[in-house]
Image (spheres, helix red, strand yellow):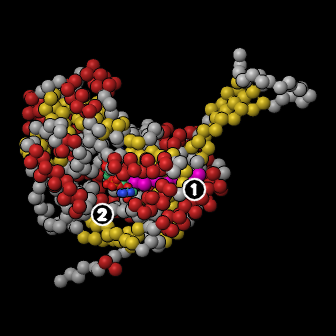
Amino acid sequence: MQTLPTIQDLPQIHHLIDGQLVAGGTRQADVFNPATGQAEKRVLLADKLTVEQAIASAHAAYPAWRNTPPLKRARVMSKLKVLLEENADAICALVTAEHGKVLSDSMGELQRGIENVEYASYAPELLKGEHSKNVGPNIDSWSEFQALGVTAGITPFNFPVMVPLWMWPMAVACGNTFILKPSERDPSSTLLVAELALQAGLPPGVLNVVHGDKEAVDTLLTDPRVKAVSFVGSTPIAQYIYSTGCAHGKRVQALGGAKNHAVVMPDADIANAVNALMGAAYGSCGERCMAIPLVVAVGDATADAVVAGLKVEIAKMKVGPGTNAACDMGPLVTKAHFDKVKGYVDQGVKEGATLVVDGRGISVPGHENGYFLGACLFDNVKPGMVTYQEEIFGPVLGVVRVKTLQEAMEMIDAHEYGNGTCIFTRDGEAARFFSDHIQVGMVGINVPLPVPVAYHSFGGWKRSLFGDLHAYGPDAVRFYTKRKTITQRWPSAGVREGAVFSFPSSR
Ligand code: NAD
């Protein structure tokens, strides 16, 4: 009989502080393989003292890094891009082993992350500032964008590679130092990427990784040496991060949860819309903040056609371990999350939605203890139902039936979240009206997952984002820098001017 390793035998995931892998903190948490249900590693949970060591390291590294020419900082990003490409298989294997998503999806996440590294390598161009000559007699003025100091990021489980790469590459390319607190549920790939950054030439202390939970996060939120915090995760925690960080005088951007609606108009190409919805609803097991968990079908005939099409496609889907290239969908991330998502399906049935496809109770041969839930499809979901209102973050798609586009838009606007939305239609006027007026931050027109590319910025509206600036892209340059405006005059030798008591102007 095979003997399972005891908890003491499991490999430990360490913190990365001052360029070294170190222990720190007395608490640990299991890291599971969701396809098997087995704990395979233990992650150390940093205590306050450990986080303070990371902050001290970042604080000490800051002056030299701030004064490193932007082009030299950018070259580290260019080297990192190459290392990420060379190590793609190893990184994605770790993502799939701890998150559960299929390998092709891990590759997609890594590629999107690499694009952010690539954009950060343009930092010298992005930091050039603004200059005006002769704003007054012999007076020139310019604005420059200076680093903030020690900055920090707190990231969720669902994109352990991509979301950290939204943050720290641009932060450090702008001259800051950084402390990253990744999700404790799947931290290995995040740590490997940070180790590659050191290999690419990032000096010790410029990027530190501390694993942990609330104790680590609270230390980052309250320490006066940390000047700015980026957060991505669920809305209740985002709100907490925003209010606590702001109360401690920090610049904060906190991206939260989502419940994205896809509108299908009667004139849409239904077959294409159905295919798009399949990937958007069930890709990554629905564990994406840009996933589509709700279809708003305009007209009963549209709804009937969409539901019929989805039923056919769901029947073809293969659910199994993410390492099997034939599988479309892997397991949910943890047993607790599996139970929560299954509970939402039970709730939907109780609330009176029609469960057209029931993915509960599937079993994957050889992976009986994995956290697998098959695709679930509800029809007749209605606003007011918990299934409609709350973020489920699983492979559960609900169809809501409405009569008009206006009714669909009122429903979307009334929802607490405003991360992403999309419309499927052949009517340009309807699409234009929708994208112009809908109260949502990212909009797709016949595009189900309108995730902006690295040189645009990412962010939702309403309770999907607390703060003013969006993540990555041009907004990240603004978030991780302070504008300073300098006005200068060099009076000619020998010219003496009298005191002026009126407010300086060019009148
Ligand atoms: P989460 O909010 O549970 O955790 C996010 C981070 O916060 C983790 O690092 C975690 O350790 C930390 N954290 C958790 N509880 C905390 C507490 N009480 N105090 C301080 N820190 C705490 O989110 P998750 O389950 O890891 O990720 C899924 C959520 O993230 C979903 O709601 C999803 O919509 C959201 N998300 C949003 C975006 C976006 O761009 N808007 C992107 C990805 C994920």
Q: Nearer the viewer, mark 1 or mark 2?
A: 1
Q: Position of residue 160 (x, y in %)?
A: 37, 56
The residue range painted magenta reads 149-155
Residue under the point 63% across and 51% down:
66
Residue under the point 45% across and 58% down:
218
Q: Is residue 495 left or right of residue 480?
A: right
In the image, is residue 283 part of the stretch drawn in magenta? Answer: no
Q: Position of residue 402 (x, y in %)?
A: 15, 29
Q: 83 or 257: nearer the eye?
A: 257
Residue under the point 50% across and 64% down:
51
Task: Please give the count of numbered marks on the rendered protein.
Answer: 2
Q: Is residue 132 left or right of residue 32?
A: right
Q: Position of residue 331 (x, y in %)?
A: 22, 58
- Relative to 449, residue 500 above or below: above
Residue under the point 25% across and 70% down:
38
**Would the CB of label 1 be found within 8 Å of ligand 1?**
no
* Residue annotated with mark 1: 225
Q: Identity of the amino acid at label 1?
A: Arg
Image quadrant holding the C terminus, namely top right
Image quadrant holding the N terminus, namely bottom left
- Relative to 113, residue 208 above or below: below
Q: Is residue 260 left or right of residue 452?
A: left
Disc 2 residue crowd, few under 14, some 14–19, many 20+, Cα 10 Å: many
Say which element carries label 1. loop
Image quadrant assignment for residue 94:
bottom left
Say which element carries label 2. helix
* Residue annotated with mark 2: 97
